[in-house]
Amino acid sequence: MRKRTQPESSSSSSPASKSEPRATDEQIKTSSNDSIHVSSAKRSGLVWTVAFATLICASYGVYYYQYEHMPPPLTAEQAGRRGFSELEAMKHVKALTQLGPHAVGSDALDRALQYVLAASQKIKESKHWEADVEVDFFHAKSGANRVGTGVFKGKTLIYSDLNHIVLRILPKYASEAGENAILVSSHIDTVSAGEGAGDCSSCVAVMLELARVMSQWAHEFKNAVIFLFNTGEEEGLNGAHSFVTQHPWSTTIRVAVDLEAMGIGGRSALFQAGPNLWAVENFAAVAKYPSGQIIGQDLFASGVFGTATDFQVYTEVAGLSGLDFAYTDKSAVYHTKAIEACDSAFIYYAPFYLHPSWLNMHYNMVQSLVRFDRNPGGTPEWLGNVIFAVVIAVVSCLTLVYLLSYVHLSGAKGPIAFASFILVGLSIIMVSSGIIPPFSEETARAVNIVHIVDASGKFGGKQEPSSYIALYSATPGKLTKEVEQIKEGFVCGRDNVIDFVTSSMKYGCLTDDNSEGGWSQSDIPTIHVNSDTVDTEGNENERITQVSIDMKGAKRLTLAINAKEIEDFTFKVRRTFK
């Protein structure tokens, strides 16, 4: 049995006891009345506190080296003809951003296409003499895009009149290279609310600079490389669909690499890949700065982010394997006008990433939380804070599970607990007093304002067209504060669900105050059913419906077919111009 004994005095005759450090002794008696002393050394609380602080600093050092320590950007002179220049790529970003928002159907998009076309022609003119560079201005007349998963599941998107720039680079004296191509893809078009520096002029800029570099090395390649600068991505991935289903080069593609943005900064990481693993294995083997997230693919496929990328078309429609890269920092406010600028961004290639210097890991988590809510207005604003706190607590406990036992034995529980309570208390006081705002400019809520002219009579039961202003957001919480500040008679709720085809408003606020100006009934496109018959002579009783659409002054029309009501169909487009 064990018996607690008093420590031996310093006058003990044993010389070993004088040299041993102070300890808590335990005496174990044996059958022969002899005893064995077992000592457990104690370390001061200061030692454990310093060790804990060292662990935190070391962890941050690893994070800083992995995510914030980036190579310096190179000028064109420093990079040379065969090197990637980040500063040259940034010139493309600024040039495209200065065009303003360039959504599909806008004059600004035509100018953006001409800019990319001119840059591609310049690459062709300055290529290596043993390389072939082909530039194709591709026009897709019409098509129907239907994907089976993700945010557009159950919808078929009809598109027409999309223009793309396609650039192919291959060795001049290897004829078989053209039949085995690698696709690198991104989109030129932007949302109507932002200039697109992040999504995705930065991607276009990286591709242009990368194409320039490859045009100097292509004579050593075994495969062709196709750069697709498409339009129509923001309307529902239509640009990628039109290319893989209509362009003759699409049949030569063996692997696809998609560049995207779900934020406006940070390192570009691999977040989707497959279905074959060899693409990931090759990326990990050759990339100097490989970066990826395992959980990203599952979350993205589940639709929790409420968005999609062209990679979905390449895998589902074209049956390709490949890699999908994106950066996600400040995702709460991307696709907005104020943030879609390129003031402090630098583009880096290795493989590709955009880096502002003040980012940190916790900040990224906050940015991601505002995009997880699939039911805006249906959950309280404090829910995100609770989720964030739980995640931090779980990660901290799992990380420190082995260290906590030593902290307990060391006697440093008091100082560490006291410091933790002080830190939490100061945080609450600073946020409550307004010294540190709970939301900053970078994490503020992004709110969509849309002018709706409804000709269906759905709202208010009116037979004639009526006009409304809709206010909605993709971030958690109700819009009570915003409505109080705007003071335009908005009524919020979940009664009026609006499907914008490429997005939807499940919770939002509507008002008809001051909404009658800026439009007239003569501007409203109309749809007319010319005929609706069933072909009884065929074996399948095929139903044929002919409709005509008068576009009036509209430049673009988004037409969606409810795949739940119409399971299988084909369509033909016949154009008449007045």
Image: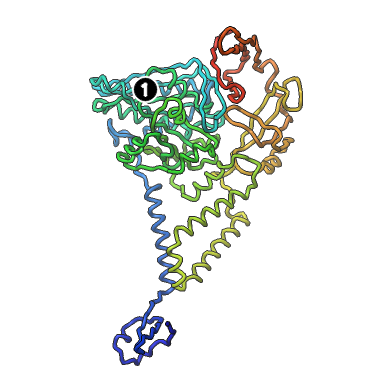
- Percent of width and height locating residue 385: 58, 51
Q: Quadrant of residue 346?
A: top left
Do we see residue 100 in this rendering? no
- Percent of width and height locating residue 328: 47, 41
Q: Secondary structure at mark 1?
A: strand
Figure check: 52 above or below 462: below
Q: Quadrant of the N terminus?
A: bottom left
- Percent of width and height locating residue 190: 51, 29
> Which of these two is toward me, 284 or 198?
284
Do we see residue 488 in this rendering? yes
Crowding at dot 1, Cα within 10 Å, few <14 / some 14-19 / many 20+, comes out as many
Q: Quadrant of residue 258?
A: top left
Figure check: 508 above or below 221: below
Is 96 placed left or right of 460 in the picture? left
Instruction: Report the number of discs.
Output: 1
Q: How is the image coloured?
A: rainbow
| Amino acid residing under circle 1 | Leu
Figure check: 417 above or below 131: below
Identity of the residue drawn at 67% across and 32% down? 497
> Which of these two is toward me, 29 or 291?
29
Identity of the residue drawn at 55% across and 23% down? 157
- Percent of width and height locating residue 482: 67, 41
Q: Quadrant of the C terminus?
A: top right
Identity of the residue drawn at 66% across and 37% down? 507
Is 541 placed left or right of 8 in the picture? right
> Which of these two is toward me, 431 or 55?
55
Residue with the mark numbered 1: 167
> Which of these two is toward me, 548 or 234?
548
Is 256 placed left or right of 547 in the picture? left
